[in-house]
Image: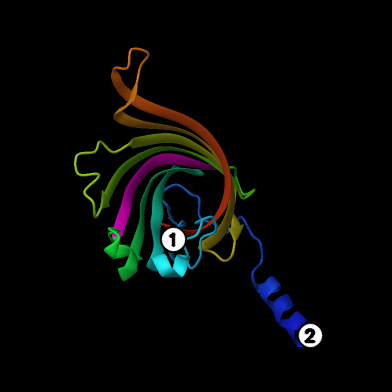
């Protein structure tokens, strides 16, 4: 235990929180890494299936998710950067039935959802305090596909959002900072002809929402 405490103390001392070292001068760059993950989930039971048993019905019930995102910015003046964020998100569900249920007419099924997100924005650092704020405009394109062909002629939703974030740059060294973030976004998602009016005529479905979230990102600061 004493040795562990000594190691943690050394790590804490060598990872000094310092905000003045982070490059935010005019002409410098920043690269941000976040929202990157791969999730492979295997469902092995479902309650509420009545008299059906999960193992008797399914050979496979897998859910996969993949997210890859990064951003880059350029400081046009000291403390103020303009940038662009890119994110790709993909999810898929694969279901395989047992032979007994295939004999009853059940067919194996898979569905995938893909999303490409582009987010231009600005970020401002408040001197050497480590505090920054950013405003991003998000444009997302969505596509879906399944083994039944249900989405072949579908009009997929289009989504836009305004993201306001506040972060705190914890400098790990001269070039890298860890950034706890709190943000709020206003989102509008529009699906063509997915709704109807009072006269039951087809109209676009428009869903507006607000969300508060927290997160963390790793940012690389490159001087000129």
| Magenta span includes 92 | no
Q: Nearer the viewer, residue 118 or 95?
A: 95
Q: Is residue 14 left or right of residue 124?
A: right
Quadrant of the snapshot with the C terminus: bottom left
| Magenta span includes 112 | yes
Check the image and name the residue furthest to the right.
2
Q: Element type at marker 1?
A: loop
Magenta residues, as a range? Answer: 109-124
Q: Residue at x 35, y 30 (%)?
A: 190
Q: Element type at marker 2?
A: loop
Which scheme is used to colour this image of the protein?
rainbow
Residue receiving disc 1: 36
Q: Can you say whether 196 is above or below 104 in the image? A: above
Q: Is residue 68 left or right of residue 186?
A: left
- Across and down, in percent, residue 177 comes to 55, 60
Residue receiving disc 2: 1
Q: Residue at x 54, y 41 (%)?
A: 165
Q: Is residue 68 left or right of residue 173?
A: left
């Amino acid at each position: 235990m004493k040795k562990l405490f000594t190691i943690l103390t050394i790590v804490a001392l060598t990872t000094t929180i310092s905000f003045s070292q982070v490059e935010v001068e005019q002409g410098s760059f920043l690269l941000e890494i976040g929202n990157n993950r791969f999730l492979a989930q295997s469902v092995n039971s479902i309650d509420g299936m009545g008299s059906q048993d999960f193992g008797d019905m399914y050979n496979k019930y897998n859910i996969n998710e993949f997210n890859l995102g990064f951003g880059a910015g350029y400081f046009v003046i000291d403390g103020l950067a303009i940038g662009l964020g890119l994110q790709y998100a993909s999810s898929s569900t694969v279901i395989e039935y047992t032979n007994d249920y295939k004999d009853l007419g059940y067919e194996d099924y898979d569905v995938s959802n893909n999303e490409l997100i582009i987010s231009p924005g600005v970020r401002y650092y408040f001197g050497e305090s480590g505090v920054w704020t950013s405003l991003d405009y998000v444009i997302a394109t969505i596509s879906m596909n399944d083994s039944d062909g249900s989405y072949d002629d579908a009009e997929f939703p289009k989504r836009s959002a305004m993201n306001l974030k506040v972060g705190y740059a914890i400098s790990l060294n001269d070039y890298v900072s860890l950034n706890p973030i709190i943000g709020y976004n206003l989102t509008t998602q529009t699906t063509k002809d997915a709704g109807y009016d009072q006269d039951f005529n087809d109209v676009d479905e428009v869903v507006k929402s607000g969300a508060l979230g927290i997160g963390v990102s790793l940012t690389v600061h490159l001087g000129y």
